Amino acid sequence: MPSSRARSSSGDQLAPYRHKRDFSRTPEPAGRTAAGSGTGPGSRRFVVQRHRARRLHYDLRLEIDGVLVSWAVPKGPTLDAGVRRAAFHVEDHPLEYFDFEGVIPSGEYGGGDVIVWDAGTWQPHDAGDPPDPGGAVAHGELHVDLYGEKLRGRFVLVRTRTGTSGRDEWLLLHKHDEFAVEGWNPEDHPRSVRSGRTNEQVRADPDRLWRSELPAARAALALKPTATPAPDPEALSQLDAFGATGSWHIFGRELRLTNLDRVLFAPRPGEAPVTKRDLLRYAARIAPVLLPYLTRRALNLRRFPNGAHAKGFWQKELPAHAPDWLPRWDNPDPGPARGYLVVDEPAALVWAANFGALEWHAWTSRVDRPDRPTYALIDLDPGGATSWADLLTLARLHRTAFEHLGLMARPKVTGRRGIQIWVPIARGPDFDSTREWVRRLSETVGAIAPELVSWEWQEGEPGDPRGDEAGAGLSRRRAPAASRARLGYAQNAANRALVAPYSPRPAPGAPVSAPISWEELDDPALSPDGFTIRTVLPRLAERGDLFGEVLRGDQHLPPLT
C-alpha cells in the first residue's frame, strides 16, 4: 500500500474510504484531509478501536500527514514482546473518526459496534531527520513509541507481503523494553477508555451517531439529551422585577420583553390568570428539558399574540425582524414558508414565547434529512360522543399492541382532549412507509373496538387523509365523523407535527401536553388537560422526564401481518 505522503499527491487520500461507504446510511464522518496536522513532536495522536464487525478485530490508527493511517489487527495489540500479531493495512480514515464510538448499521462496510479501546499520542522512531513516518510506511517498516492508557512503549510495524486480496500484510510487535508485559492479552482489558463501557453496552445503548452529510465539525449528533443548565435564579428574579417591559438577559442572550402583565390564559376556578410573564418564566425553566426534543428540527409555531381567548394563527416562517442569533433552517422545498426557527439553544424557546407562540410543534424529521422521520406518531382524537373512558380503552389497546410487537413507545396527554403515542425509530423509512405502518396498526387496533372508532374526516381538517389511498380504504366504517374517536395517522408527513411534549395549549389555566407512564392509563385521576405550566414542573422534579426514551431512535418498525 503506498504511503500517505505518496497518496497526497494524487488528490484525495480518503477516496478509498469514501468509496466503501454509503454515507446516506452509515453514521460515520465522510471526513476531510487536514493539511499539516500532527507534525510537531508529541502532537501526533493514535487510537485503537475495538470493532465487532463480521469478525472481532482491533483497528490501530496513527495520525500521519493529516489522516489516520490504519491497520486491522485481528487478535489485537499486546505488550507481550514474545508475541507477533498479524496486521492488515487498510484504507486511511478521516481525523474525525478518531474518537468515534457507536454502531455502524448492518449491511454497510464495517457494520458493527465500535469502542475507543485505547488512545493517546505517539512519536516516530528511526524515521529520518526530520521524521517522515509516511515515508517509513511506504518503505514497509515503522517504529513508534506509544503513550496510551493501555499501550505503552516501542512498537514495530513491518510489512511482510501483499496478500492475494491486494492488502498489505504486516506484523505488529512490541520491543523488549520497560513497558513489555509477558502474557498480556487485550481481551483481558475490554472496556473503552472514552466511556468505560464494553462493546456490548455500546451496542445496546449507543450515545451518538455520526452524520457524514453534515460538515465534519457538526457531524457528531447526540442520541441522548445533553444537559442544558437551568436558568440562572438571578435571571428569574430579574424577570419578576420588571414592570411591563424590560431587557432580559437569559441563557446568554438579551431579549426585549413587552406587555409582561398581559393575560394570555384565562384562570381556572380558584387560580390566578396566566400572564405573559408567567409563560416566559415557564419557557425558561422547561427549556433544558424540552431542548433535546426540538434540536435540529424545524418548529411550527401557533401564535396568540393577544392571548388564548383570541383567534390564533400558524406561523412557520421567521419574521424579518427576528434577531440574527436565532438558529434557523432554510427549507430547500419551501412551499409557503422558507426560513424556519430551529430551537438549538434554550434562549430560542424563550424568544418564541415572547413572540406570542403558545404552542410549539416540532417536525418529526431533522433538518439535515427532512424527508426521513425519526418518530412514528399515533393521535387518539376523541369525537363528540367519545368519553374519556373510551379513549383510555383505545390507548390501553395500543399499549397491548406495542407489548406484543416488542416496541418501545411512550404516551402523553395532549393538554386538550386526546392522547398521543410516539414511537422512536431509526432514521431510514420515508413518511409514506411510516404513515402506512401506522395506518395498518390503527386498522388492527380499531378492529378490536369498532364501535369506538370512525375513519371519516371532515374535508379540510388537519387529519384529513383525502387523496391518500390508504385513508380512502378505511372509509368503509360509516359512523358519523363527529361522534367517534379517530386513530390519526395522517400527521406522519413532512411539515406536519404533533404538539411537542411540555408545550402549552391555548386554554384556561395554560394546560400542557404532558408525558405520562403507561401505568397512569389505569389511574382514575388522570385527565387529558390536568397538567399545567404551574404543575408540570413539580411533577418533573418528582418523577423525571417520562418521555426521555423516545430520544433513542434505534428501533425498526416490524412488519405487520
Image (cartoon, grey):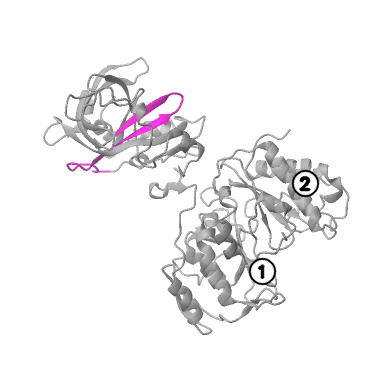
Asked if the stretch drawn in magenta spans residue 311, the answer is: no
Please tell me in which quadrant of the rendered image residue 481 appears: bottom right
Q: Is residue 11 visible?
A: no
Q: Residue at x 67, y 77 (%)?
A: 271
In the image, residue 224 sits, relative to residue 340, either above or below, namely above
Q: Residue furthest bottom?
A: 243
Amino acid at the residue labelled 2: Gly
Spot occupied by residue 94 in the image (x, y as percentages of width and height): 35, 39
Q: Earlier in the sequence, mark 1 or mark 2?
A: 1
Q: Residue furthest left?
A: 129
Asked if the stretch drawn in magenta spans residue 50, the answer is: yes
Q: Residue at x 71, y 45 (%)?
A: 399
Q: Is residue 2 visible?
A: yes
Spot occupied by residue 551 in the image (x, y as percentages of width and height): 55, 49
In the image, residue 102 sits, relative to residue 243, either above or below, namely above
Q: Is residue 39 left or right of residue 106?
A: left
Q: Which residue is mark 2?
A: 471
Q: Are marks 1 and 2 in contact (CB under 8 Å)?
A: no
Graded by Cα atoms within 10 Å as few (under 14), some (14 to 19) or many (20 or more), the crowding at tag 1 reads: few
Q: Give the magenta part as a residue range.
A: 35-61
Q: CA distance from mark 1 to mark 2?
A: 27 Å
The residue lying toward the viewer, choosing from 38 and 262, is 262
Q: Which residue is mark 1?
A: 313
Spot occupied by residue 530 in the image (x, y as percentages of width and height): 69, 64
The residue lying toward the viewer, choosing from 341 and 106, is 106
Q: Is residue 115 left or right of residue 471?
A: left
Please tell me in which quadrant of the rendered image residue 135 appears: top left
* Mark 2 residue element: helix
Q: Residue at x 83, y 45 (%)?
A: 449
Graded by Cα atoms within 10 Å as few (under 14), some (14 to 19) or many (20 or more), the crowding at tag 2 reads: some
